[in-house]
Amino acid sequence: MSDVSKNIKILRKRNGWSQRQAAEQLEISVPAFSKIETGTTDLNISRLNQIARLFKVTPMQLLATEEDPQVLHALNVGQLKKQIEKKEAEIIRLQDEIIQLFERIRTKKNGG
């Protein structure tokens, strides 16, 4: 398995996607995606760019090797940013719930 294939698999798993889900987003068959992820199929530049966009990384980050910690670090930073965005959305949702609960309590106290 090539470094590119490993990186794609890592990114797919970090996103919590099955091979089917990733393949659907790339508009390719599951067997075609599986071949990409196992390194059976070589990627052309167009497909590499498409996969990079899907995972919100640069093509260079997909090409990173284990010996290139700076590029691998960038992969991790990108994933951490996505996790932070999800947590921020969750915080906003919880804040909305708190406001709604506060409004219900205030309404009940005022005899409503």
Image: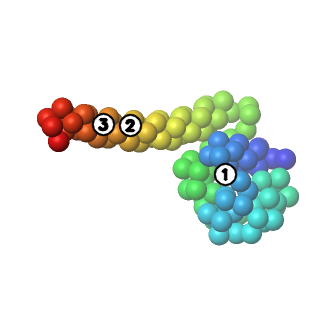
Say what amino acid the circle numbered 3 marks.
Leu
Q: Residue 35 in the image: state x and y as whole percent.
A: 82, 60
> Is 58 left, or right, of 38 in this rendering?
left
For the residue pair 45 and 9, the one nearer the viewer reads as: 9
Say what amino acid the circle numbered 1 marks.
Trp
Residue 1 versus residue 42 in the image, above or below: above
Q: Earlier in the sequence, mark 2 or mark 3?
A: 2
Q: Residue 94 in the image: state x and y as whole percent.
A: 38, 37
Crowding around mark 1 (Cα neighbors within 10 Å: few <14, some 14 to 19, many 20+) is few
Q: CA distance from mark 1 to mark 3?
A: 34 Å
Residue 19 versus residue 15 in the image, above or below: below
Q: Which residue is mark 2?
A: 94
Judged from the image, the secondary structure of the residue bearing numbered disc 1 is: loop
Q: Which residue is mark 3?
A: 101
For the residue pair 70 and 50, the one nearer the viewer reads as: 50
Splitting the image into 4 quarters, where does residue 22 fall? bottom right
Q: How many marks?
A: 3
